[in-house]
Image (spheres, rainbow, N blue to C red):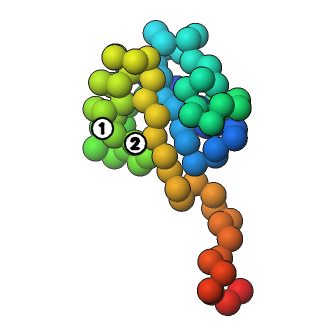
Amino acid sequence: MKFTVYRCVDDPDLFVVTDDVHRKDISAAACPGGGGIKEVGRFDEMGEDRAAFNEMLAKDAIKTQGFYRFEAKTWDPVAQAPAAMPV
């Protein structure tokens, strides 16, 4: 399976994954907050070396609802330091 990964524009910590069969049906409605989606890329299955999401869960969700949504809180590489931490 080849996964297509999208990022929710209004909530950049949320990602939506689908496959080639359901790709044409994906819209911003897959993001709970609405807004748009932006394609991140297309990826082959990685098996145990996967980095961002569980492929088995994604396959099951794609089969039943056409997409898999997951949250990745660490996406922003330049996150702001907590208020209690010195800069």
**Residue 12 place in picture, x, y as percent:** 64, 46
Q: Amino acid at mark 1?
A: Gly
The residue depicted at 41 percent of the width and 48 percent of the height is 51
User: To which quarter of the image does residue 11 belong?
Assistant: top right
Q: Label 1's element? A: helix
Q: Nearer the viewer, residue 40 or 27?
A: 27
For marks 2 and 1 on the same chain, the one whose residue lies earlier in the sequence: 1
Q: Residues within 10 Å of mark 1 (few under 14, many from 20)?
A: few
Question: What residue does disc 2 label?
Answer: 53
**Rendered position, 45 above or below 77:** above
Q: Label 2's element? A: loop
Contact check, label 2 and label 1, Cβ < 8 Å = no
User: To which quarter of the image does residue 36 belong?
Assistant: top right
**Residue 60 place in picture, x, y as percent:** 30, 24
Task: Please state which of the two labelled residues, at mark 2 or mark 1, is closer to the viewer.
Answer: 2
Instruction: From the viewer's perspective, tell me whether residue 48 is left or right of residue 17.
Output: left
**Rendered position, 4 above or below 71:** above
Instruction: From the viewer's perspective, tell me whether residue 60 is left or right of residue 52.
Output: left
Q: Quadrant of the C terminus?
A: bottom right
Q: Which label sits on residue 47?
A: 1
Q: CA distance from mark 2 to mark 1?
A: 11 Å
User: To which quarter of the image does residue 44 belong?
Assistant: top left
The residue depicted at 67 percent of the width and 90 percent of the height is 86
The residue depicted at 69 percent of the width and 38 percent of the height is 9
Q: Amino acid at mark 2?
A: Phe
